[in-house]
Image (cartoon, grey):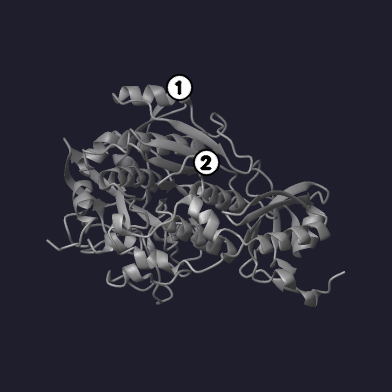
Amino acid sequence: MAHASDRVEIPGSAREVNHTHARVGDIDQQAEIEVSVYLRAPGSLDWVDQEAGRPPNARRRLTREEWAQTQGAATADIDAVKSFAADADLTVTDVDASRRVVHLRGTVAAMAAAFGATMVGLFEPASGAARYRAREGSLTVPAALEGIVTGVFGLDDRPQARAHLRITPHDAASSYSPVEVAQAYAFPTAASGKGETVGILEMGGGFSTTDLATYFNSLGLSNPSVTAVSVDGGANSPGQDTNADGEVMLDIEVVGAVANDAAIAVYFAPNTDQGFIDALSTAVHDTTNKPSVISISWGQSEDSWSAQARTQMEQIFTEAAGLGVTVTVAAGDNGSTDSVTDGQQHVDFPASAPHALACGGTSLQASNGTISSESVWNDPGDGATGGGVSRQFALPSYQANANVPNNVDSGTPGRGVPDVSGDADPGTGYRILVDGADQTIGGTSAVAPLWAGLIARLNQELGAPVGFVQPRLYTLLGTPAFQDITTGNNGSYSAGPGWDACTGLGSPNGTELASRLPGTAAAS
């Protein structure tokens, strides 16, 4: 038997028990579970950021097939994990070299022994809620796997994220179809997303094809191609969770309305860090559907994620950039605290990942395709846009000249959230069909698919995927490519001229973006 000294910690793998959740029992040690073991990359992806400042059609990017050949897991690394699994009485159920992930199956007891996990019991977030396995402390692997294994997910299956939507409980002051929002933001009319695929990540809920057909027919639009993809046993399951169904239908209906000719692939996964990470990795490396843009409307305060989960997600976002895939992410609906009650300000993750396009929220007044006013979304009864300064990620180079303030609590610099914004106020929300009922829905959950649809149209119009677009977008600060939002606040951060931690660069003028992204940004 190996001694403790023969083992090493997996960096960032420590987890803590959530003491606000009730311990409701012991874990069945003989129950079988499956974990995802992620492996190191063969080399640096620094070239991704170096290329990002170039016009989209002049960048170096890899196809998914080229990626598998040059950036996949080394055979020796995979073999080392297989050998470890055999010694630990675990079964290898799947190996995906291009995603650099190995799936292992075994009993809780065997898995805990293999990874040095301290399993502490079954917990329940609230009475009647789904129970989950919890662990605490760090994970370890044999010293021979040091540096090879970068993350292990699935031992702890606590709920990880929440949907960032707000269903209007009353008559909205104004409401719009997604088509009307796209018109207000001058989405380029020569493009409809044709030839593009938009991936959508969902941690629950489902869609009804009948509802989709009814909805798009009501808008006078064709019914887009929508494909459900199962990840880790997740499935399209409408009717079981109304709130999650609202998220799924909002995402699909916004994307399908503003980029009607784009195909849509919806990746369903369990709401755990393992499910979230596996869904993102699956979508990014999907050689069947090949999404050029991915929309994520789920998240949670960055402090609620383990460091290994944040690192793994950001690694996958960087891989997306290398493949020319843009990932739009909702910035949260709970203002600058992100609903954390410790008296501090928090940003939402994965929006705070530097290679994610973080999408904040505004309150929009528009008619006949013309904006009359736009301010920060902040309604004490209906939520407020997330935004602020990360304490987990450093200030990225593309924000170096954006005058991102220091974090108001720590006084330290960090990645500013969001990058961009769009209509999110449920009082000026989107008219959506969910489970056979008309609803008005807002939240930054609507902004991520809105921007995903815009990106699909830009990709078609430019003839090349914009991919990791932030470095290009930040050169357009102060140009007509954005409506600069200068009024309102989200709690501890206020809007003002230029970038701010409520609405980022502002809301889009899609036609101006299409004309300015290919060339050198000139202030005007």
Q: Position of residue 493 (x, y in %)?
A: 33, 64
Mark 2 is on which residue type? Tyr
- Location of the C terminus by quadrant is bottom left
Q: Position of residue 477 (x, y in %)?
A: 22, 62
Q: Tally the marks.
A: 2
Sequence-wise, the earlier of marks 2 and 1 is 1
Image height check: is 251 above or below 88? above
Left or right for 453, reference 64: left
Q: Residue furthest right?
A: 1
Residue 210, label in figure: 1
Q: Position of residue 223 (x, y in %)?
A: 37, 26
Residue 267, label in figure: 2
Is residue 183 in sight in this rendering? yes
Q: Tell me the residue at 32%/23% (across/down).
A: 218
- Location of the N terminus by quadrant is bottom right
Q: Tell me the residue at 50%/57% (across/down).
A: 316
Image height check: is 337 above or below 256? below
Q: CA distance from mark 2 to mark 1?
A: 19 Å
Closer to the camera, 331 or 473?
473
Closer to the camera, 163 or 48?
48
Closer to the camera, 312 or 15?
312
Q: CB of mark 2 within 8 Å of CB of mark 1? A: no
Mark 1 is on which residue type? Thr
Left or right for 197, reference 480: right
